[in-house]
Every structure is written in C-alpha cells, then in structure tokens.
Image: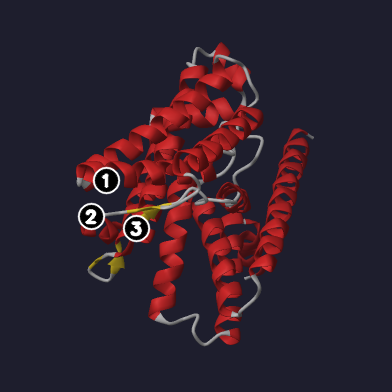
Amino acid sequence: MRKWVNRLLQNEQAGLLLALILLCVVLSFLSPVFFTALNIKNVLRDAALVAIAGIGMVMVILLGEIDLSVGSVQAVAGIVAVAVLNSFSSVFVALGATLFAGACIGLINGLLITRAHINSLIATLGMMAILRGGAMVSTQAVSIQGSVDSFVEIGTGHLGPIPIPVLIAFLLLALFFYVLHYTTFGRYVYAVGGNPQAARLSGLPVDRIRIAVFVIAGILAALSAFILASRLNSGQPNAGLGFELQVIAAVILGGISLTGGVGTLAGAFIGILILTVLSNGLVLLNVSSFYHDIARGIVIILAVYLDTRRKQSLVRRMLSGIK
C-alpha cells in the first residue's frame, strides 16, 4: 500500500489531478453554486478557450521557446473575424480569414526567430505590442458588433448537453495528443526542444519545425479568438489582456518545462483546469478582480518554481543512475 502511495505521489500528473480534486472539494464547501450544472458548463467553456490556445503554447514551450503574442492575437483575430463576418455575412468565410490571420502572425513570429535570429521572448513581446496597438488604431478603441445571428451559436451553443467550444477543445486535444506522441513530427518537436544542436546534427530541419510550430500556435490562438468573439458577438480591441500569462502559467503548472523537451499535453490540460477552476472559485466567492491578478501572479511564480524543482530532481536521478 505504501509503495502504491509513493508511486502515486511521484507521478506528476496524478499529483496535479489530486490537487484539482482537492480544489474542487474545497470550493464546493465554500460555495453551493460551484457544483451546479450551469457553473460546471461555464468552467469548461472558459477552460476550452485557454486549452485551444494552450495546445499551441505547449508545442512552443516544448521547443524551448515562448510566445507572448497570444493575448494580442485574441484581439486582432477577433476583430478580423467580426469585420469579415459583417462584410460577407458568412461564418465560414470569417473563420477562414481568422485562421489565415493567425497563421500569418505565427509565420512572422517563426521567421523573426529563425531567420532574424531574435530571441522568441523579444520577438513575440514586440509582436504583442504591434498587434495590440494595431487593434486599437484600426477600431479607434471601439468594439465591433457582429451582424449575423448564427455567429453567436459557435461560442454559446450546445451539441446535445456539451457546449460547442468544449467539444472543439476536446477534439483538438485528442488530435494533438496523437500528433505529439505518435507521429514523426511530434518526436521532432521533443527532439528539437531537448537538444536543438544534436537535432540539427542529426539532420532534422530545426528551423522549419520551429516555424511550423509557431504557425500552428498562431492558428490555434486565432481559433480561440474566433470562439471568444462569437461568445461576445463582437470584436474587442482590449480582448485577451493578460491572456498570454494565463495560458503560459497553466501549461507550466501542468508540467511543461520552460527549457523545452519535457512535458505532456495531458498534464498541461490538468494545469489549465486548475487555473480555470481557481478563477471561477474567486468569482463565486465575490473576491475582487484585483485579487485575481495577484492569484495569477502567485500561480506563475509557483509554476516556475515547480519547473525548477522538476529539473533539479531529474538531474539528481541522472547522477544517481551514473553512480
């Protein structure tokens, strides 16, 4: 029994799942509303937006890179979605334009990193500022309302009892779990993140892999923006403020190492659920929104601390194995 418990505690994903369960139990005692069907749907709907963008962030961080432009992509892609929707009165054309915009942003980020050799932190920080400023300038800091009634169904509708955003998120999680763990491209992502020099010497197209990952991340961030714009029935230039920190904190909390090459999509999803449940609980307990930022900052610091401890533990195990 003790050996089974020790294995459970050493399993990182099991520990995260236990933390999620304990958090849910505590919140259920503090707020009788927490375990209602409506609130659970709201939690899953919020988690879906983070999860869709988080899949791309997981792949970026697995490469040992970072993408700070995700929040600003939510603003720009949402504005593109509503503007195209109002012009063509077609949800499908708007979706295509939104995903294309996200792909272009991801491509620019990838080229800045691989061709201009700019650190990903600086490149995406600059892109974040450019996109946010462009969103404000193009709309004069005023939101754009959608004029097609069916548009809101994507963000607020259901397929049976399941909200459509949740269904989209789970389908994408299943798809990219397969891609990362059962395809050559997924193995290349882990290899490049684990040791880019060795990957390059082995003949892997390191730069093309990086560009492809940033394009995928841009497309997924734009899809998350499209769903958010549908939910609000508007494109808002201030959408996604702080969203990038929420996504990064969630995936690192879920075990994705900042140094690259370590972590799983399943762990990242549990981290996303933990952070979303925490935010939902603070709302239900009528905690001021200012404290939400404090809580998010604490989680970011905790996530980086846990990542550091994980790396130290890995090094100790390797050294003990050598001895």
Q: Amino acid at mark 1?
A: Leu
**Dot 3 alpha-carbon crowd within 10 angstroms: few under 14, some 14 to 19, many 20 or more:** many
The local crowd at label 2, few if under 14, some if 14 to 19, many if 20 or more residues have their Cα within 10 Å, is: some
Q: Which residue shows up at 66% across the image and 35% down it?
A: 259
Say if residue 261 shows up in the picture: no
The answer to whether residue 286 is above or below residue 302 is below
- Name the kind of residue labelled 3 in the image: Asn
Q: Toward the viewer: 137 or 37?
A: 137
**Percent of width and height locating residue 279:** 58, 67
Q: Position of residue 282 (x, y in %)?
A: 61, 73
Residue 274 position in % (x across, y down): 57, 63
Label 3 vs 2, first from the N-terminus: 2
Q: Amino acid at mark 2?
A: Val
User: Which quarter of the figure is the N terminus placed in?
Assistant: bottom right
Reading the image, the residue beneath label 1 is: 85
Q: Are marks 3 and 2 in contact (CB under 8 Å)?
A: no
Q: Of marks 3 and 1, which one's residue comes earlier in the chain?
A: 1
**Mark 1 nearby-residue class (10 Å; few <14, some 14–19, many ≥20):** many
Residue 288 is drawn in which quadrant?
bottom right
Q: Quadrant of the C terminus?
A: top right
Q: Are marks 2 and 1 in contact (CB under 8 Å)?
A: yes
**Nearest the eye: 47 or 317:** 47
Of the pair 180 and 128, the residue shown nearer to us: 128
Mark 3 falls on what kind of element? loop
C-alpha distance separating marks 3 and 2: 9 Å
The residue where tag 2 is placed is 148
Q: Which residue does the numbered mark 3 point to in the structure image? A: 233
Horizontally, is 162 left or right of 317 in the view? left
Earlier-in-chain disc, 2 versus 1? 1
Q: Residue 68 vs residue 212: left or right?
A: right
- Is residue 267 placed above or below 95 in the rendered structure? below
